[in-house]
Amino acid sequence: MALPGLKQQLQHLIESMVNEGILVEQQFAQVQELKTSDNPNFVSQILNDFCDGAETSITNLNKFLCEEQVEFDKLDTSIHLLKGSSSSIGAYQMRLATVDLVKAVDEKDKEMSLEALKKVTHEYLRIQYKLQTIIQLENKMYDIESKPLLHDGNCAAGPSYTKDI
Amino acid sequence: MGGNLKTQSHHSVAVRLNEQMGAKKGFTFIQAYRAWFPKLLMLWILVMAYLSLSIYNYMDADNKVRRVEVLSSMCDQRARMLQDQFNVSVNHVHALAILVSTFHYLKNPSAIDQETFAEYTARTAFERPLLSGVAYAQRVVNSERESFERQNGWTIKTMEREPSPIRDEYAPVIFSQETVSYIESIDMMSGEEDRENILRARATGKAVLTSPFRLLGSHHLGVVLTFPVYKSKLPPNPSVEERIKAASGYLGGAFDVESLVENLLGQLAGNQAIMVYVYDVTKSSDPLIMYGHQYHQDGDMSLLHESKLDFGDPFRKHQMICRYHHKAPTSWTAINTAFLFFVIGLLVGYILYGAAMHIVKVEDDFREMEELKVRAEAADVAKSQFLATVSHEIRTPMNGILGMLALLLDTALSGTQRDYAQTAQACGKALIALINEVLDRAKIEAGRLELEQVPFGIRSILDDVLSLFSEKSRNMGIELAVFVSDKVPEIFIGDPGRFRQIITNLVGNSIKFTERGHIFVKVHLAEPSKAMINGKSMTYLNGGSDEGVKTSVGRQFKTLSGCEAADDQNSWDTFKHLIANEEHRTDVSSNVAANNEASEHVTLMVSVEDTGIGIPLCAQERVFMPFMQADSSTSRHYGGTGIGLSISKCLVELMGGRINFISRPHVGSTFSFTANFGRCKENVVSDLKKPKLEDLPSNFRGLRSILVDGKLVRAAVTKYHLKRLGILVEVVSSIKMAVAFCGRNGSATSGNIVPPDIILVEKDAWISGEECDLNIQQLEWKQNGHIYKLPKMILLATNFGEGEFDNAKAAGFTDTVIMKPLRASMVAACLQQVLGIGKKRQQGKELPNGSNFLQSLLSGKKILVVDDNKVNRRVAEGALKKFRADVVCADSGKAALHLLQIPHNFDACFMDIQMPEMDGFEATRRIRQMESKANGEINGGLEGVARKGEWHLPVLAMTADVIHATYDECLKCGMDGYVSKPFEEENLYQAVAKFFKSKPES
């Protein structure tokens, strides 16, 4: 697919996510802005990191919460990780779910914690699917963009290609 | 923490109070015995009373003794007289008895009969004044009675005038004085008293007395004297029997004691004063009164005198008792003396007591006042502490509110909602700013504010402040300029934040109240007054010639903008001397400079001059009081709380300086202050840092320029900025002169002298309509075929009206226009653009203003990002890299510590707070520990290899949680600030600007 098409597709996807309320436009835009010529893979990298981290955290949380005697103190690190990373990329619904989880863990309520974790997992799965799409689109765009650069000896990449997103 | 602080401060207040009380422990003697005073007073009064009583007694005793003496002498006198008189009478009776004996018994027939006796006694009565009368009773034994009765022709009668019953013996009266004739023929033996008397008399042969009784005739008290008459001569020592036998009759006389004594006393002086009693005390248990009123008990009972009376009867005892008629008269002298003494004593006592009480009271009051004072001071401190605490406590929830608003803004909001939320956020930020100001003031008042001591460069700070206000000043068309004298060192040690705060405050104020003209910040060394005086005197010398110039264009003043200023200090007349002095000094007297260098401190004199509305005279003294504005309408017109100046004052005082101002209403105000800063000792270091410090490109060094400006002060300012860039400046007052200058350079001895690289023209110099000249000149240069490139034309302007910009371009300022206020860095940027030199990397991407600035700040800085969250770490890394920082990441506190082993070459560290194992606070603490250790070693002289004077890595906390991680908490563990996550440019800028601007070495 051509570059403009991919860009448009990406934009539509993000717009729909924003409209659904699962993504905060500003924050995600900020992440996107951080993509520079020096670091063209930034968005996909960070989203991958996010997914990896979130999956690890959720697995950990599940493990800890399913134990007979829940050691709530152990949960903090994973929850904090979830909360921080979701707010960083602007995964709004997930962040809200995490806040509930924090509350439940603070109260040391196993039932509520499990419930909240279920919700977090649900929200994660919801966004994960879309994030994967974004990652794919980004990768495709990266492939397309890097190719001509290989042919062109001039390394000065157009400085403004991130600007249009 | 707030609570902790509070208790601590309370404790300190209490301690101070105790100390104050302790200081007053040196009780005076009076204070120590205050409870004794009333008792002492009572004691004193008692002593005085006792003393006065003694005095009285002493004086009275004297009187009494005299009185007793008088009484006794009077009494004795009376007694003696009475006794004498009595004895005289008795003697007469005795004589009478002998007469009777002689002429009645020894003569036969008797020579005496009743008539003779009566005659004789009557005629000799004067001899017996005490006797009412005398009578002679003959002794008649019972056997002789009848013959006797017959002989005399009457019967013997008893006292009751009845014929006497038969007895052994009778003593009928045969002769009697006429005064007592009624007792004739009465048997004297019939009366008990008389009988006893008779018996006793004849037994003793002496005069005897009866006990007192009422006399028959007068009913006066009296006694009867009985004297025996013997028939025959008695033997020399007759026995009692002989006497009884010899007794032939008895002579008796009645003493009317009462009238007797009365008469006697009547003859004596002082009769009224004393009362006299005469008693028969034969039976001592039952004294019989002979004279005196038995029941008349008034008179002075306390004092009496007894005198013995001897009436010649050994059987009977009599005594006279005298007493004063009246009680002893009160001795007024004694009373007065005693009373006066008492009163005086009382008064003295009371005065002493009053004085003591007064002292006690005054001391008490003093202590109370002291206590109140201490309490008031404590209250004042407490107020400030309260303010500080409360402000702090307000800040926390405010941060929460702001954080929540920020979160709210991130949610899906409608346009209106977003607008509301943004407004709320803006208001909240304004409120936080205000609270911070209040907190500052409170902290200063509570003495909790401490100034930092870090090296900083004043010029960059001033540029920074200028940039803050540049937008505003441009919009208002005000000239805003900064001038720092060359003598002011590049860097010195002090608190850059606070210094900036003062300047910002003053300039902000000036901008607020200025509508036209200029605002001019000038910094120079506070000179020992000599140079200033020199300058001034010269000014006055030159004054005359300058006047003319001044008046040429209406009222044009030689200030920055030509408007009149309140203080002449900054007008060219004094200004040029300042500059001249400097140049002179740097040229000639390196000694003086060396001296200056040697001193520990630098005292800066900073003045901020504006041409605003000025401060009304009446309000001038209140200017530095908190929350005071010229009048209440000021805050309505111009806004603000009026706390800024008072904070500035406090800060200036903390810096060891003074702030004052000169203001003329409708002319302007000039605020000036002095401040002490430490001189940066390491000259070498500062030299090395110089280019880095200013962060100004050095590739303009050696460029030559001509500045066209008619206003000398303004020209000096422009020159100052250009000089900082290393550009040589030649100032000319008009374009004509510039042309001439160029022309001269161009035509004369070609080759050696180069035409200027830049020509800078002030807008108003250009407007005066000489642009054609320039064009001509340019053409000339072209025609001459100079090998050198043409000088770049730059227009300096404060603001542009409509179309002016196009005009300027048309007029030949094709190169650029620099908008004022001038800042060295900005000028540099423009020149870079114009001259096309020193362009490192020209990016097509246009960043907004703040980003540009951030980029300049962060570019090339080596920054460590510590975060356990990979996503966050990446975001932070990306954000910092965007501003061309050199970013290194660490995923835990431990890793960060490892990377930060000294020596390292990081410029800053962004630290996540919430991390497993070692959180950001702990990590920062460890970093600081390492640093202090390293610093200690450096200072210990172990190693002189130091990248900077001291290791202090700026550590900024990263936290998503504005509510929890308050600024103070971060500061407590040694962090320098915090940025909220995710990174916002504005936030990042604020946090970063603080270090990379004010810290020259980073």
Image (cartoon, grey):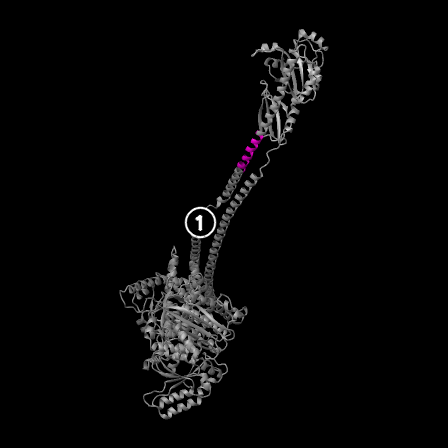
Is residue B319 toward the left or the right of residue B882 in the image? Answer: right
- Examine the rendering and report whether any part of residue B486 can be seen: yes
Name of the residue lying farthest toward the left: B942
Find numbered disc 1 in the image and state the secondary structure of the residue it sits on.
loop
Front in this rendered view, residue A142 or B317: B317
Q: Which chain carries label 1?
A: B
- Dividing the picture into quarters, in which one does residue A101 lie? bottom left
Where residue B949 sits, quadrant-wise, is bottom left
Would you say the magenta stretch is mainly helix, strand or loop? helix
Say few, some or many: other residues with alpha carbon within 10 Å of mark 1 (under 14 / 14 to 19 / 20 or more). few
> Where's residue B60, x and y in %?
55, 36
Q: On screen, B917 above or below B468?
A: above
Magenta span:
B56-72
Quarter of the rendering occupied by the N terminus of chain B? bottom left
- The residue wearing badge 1 is B27
The residue lying at 32 percent from left, 72 percent from top is: B594
Estimate the x, y position of residue B48 in percent, counting from the top left.
52, 41
Residue sitting nearer the eye, A50 or B363: B363
Amino acid carrying mark 1 in the image:
Phe
